[in-house]
Structures are given as structure tokens and as C-alpha cells.
Amino acid sequence: MIIHKLNAIINPLFPIGEFIETEEAPETQCKENILSEDIKQAKELEKKGVELAEAGNLNEAVVQFEKAITIAPNWASAYNNRAQALRLAGRNNEALADLNNALVITKGSGKVAMQSFCQRAMLYELSCREDAVKDWEAAAKLGSTFAKNRLVQLNPYAALCNKMLHDVFKRLKEGQV
């Protein structure tokens, strides 16, 4: 298992376990054999891309992810990681295209799909698209704690309850109750 540090940089509020890359269920990642040389090479390029993104060199990181995609075009993780770097670089339309590709490849299941749904939901929220809720729900169904929490935050009743509880505890703390 590899914890993608890029995810922690881009999404510091995500729980750490949310972005553990596993090699389980390769059929949701790629139609090719998971141990193929192309996949191994793509994973190495992804690692380089993550390191470059961590160092703040987003353009070079994108180049590494592009190389990984060229070598293994059905490797969804490379699309998801490139989308993160593109998003950091403010290239949201390109990031959306990569997230859509990752979701097609994964058929909407597995860890990479969960990550892609979360990222796409964030981009949809930024552009005030109602599709965001559908993506949060899809990510939550795949086990994303972050998506589950976001859905609670988006629920107006939950938000009202949270505000009321906050106010009660604040008054208790101040000795007003």
C-alpha cells in the first residue's frame, strides 16, 4: 500500500486512510494485468509526479502523470493524480475531464473511484453545480468518511441542529444556562 502524499497536500481535511492506494480488485483499476510492466512503469512515473507536486512543481508533475497515462491508458490512478495536480494549478476543466476518465475506467467502484468522486464533487461545488451531491453520495457509498461528513454539512437540518448545539454549548461554557 502506498499513501499518496499528494492527496494529503491537496486535501488536508481528508482522513489519512481515505487515500490509501491498494492493489486489490485490479479489475476496477485496469483491464490489463496489474503486474504488467506497463503498470509498474506507470506507477513509478506516478510516484515521481507526486514527489514533484509535493515540491511545488505542478507543471512537471503533470508531465509525469501524462507519461504514466501514455504508457498505461487504462490506469485510472494516473488520471486521478493528474486531476489533483491540475486542480492545484487552477486548471479545473482539465481536471474534470481526467476525473471523468478515471470514473469510466473504474466503472465507479474501488478506491480510485471514491477519490475521483470526492474530487469531482469539490469541483462541482466550486461551480455551484447540483451534481456535487450525487458525487458525494457515490463516494460515501464507496466508504469515504470525508464524503459522508460533507453530506451531513450540506444537509440544512443537520446544519441547523449543529448550530443549535454549538449555541447551547457556548452558553453553557459562558454560564448562561
Image: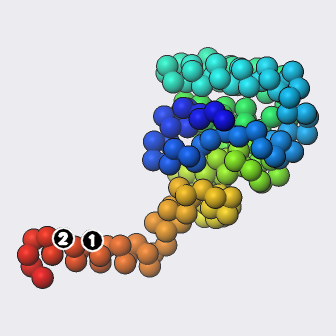
C-beta proximity under 8 Å, tags 1 and 2: yes
Q: Which residue is mark 2?
A: 170
Inspect this view and state whether residue 90 appears.
no
Q: Is residue 23 left or right of residue 164?
A: right
Q: Is residue 28 left or right of residue 66?
A: right
Model colouring: rainbow
Residue drawn at the location 70% of the way across and 47% of the way down: 111
- Helix, strand, or loop for circle 1? helix
Percent across and percent down for residue 167 are 23, 74
Percent across and percent down for residue 92 are 60, 39
The amino acid at mark 2 is Lys
- Helix, strand, or loop for circle 2? helix
In the rendered image, the residue lying farthest to the bottom is 177
- 135 and 91: which is toward the camera: 135
Q: Which residue is mark 1?
A: 166
Percent across and percent down for residue 65 are 70, 25
Quadrant where the N terminus sits is top right
Inspect this view and state whether residue 7 appears.
yes
**Quadrant in which residue 4 is drawn:** top right
Residue drawn at the location 55% of the way across and 37% of the way down: 7
Percent across and percent down for residue 38 are 86, 23
Disc 2 crowd rating (10 Å Cα; few below 14, some 14-19, many 20+) is few
Q: Is residue 140 left or right of residue 159?
A: right
- 25 and 30: which is toward the camera: 25
Residue drawn at the location 35% of the way across and 73% of the way down: 162
Q: Is residue 116 above or below residue 81?
A: below
Residue drawn at the location 55% of the way across and 32% of the way down: 6
Q: Is residue 57 above or below residue 140?
A: above
**Quadrant in which residue 66 is drawn:** top right
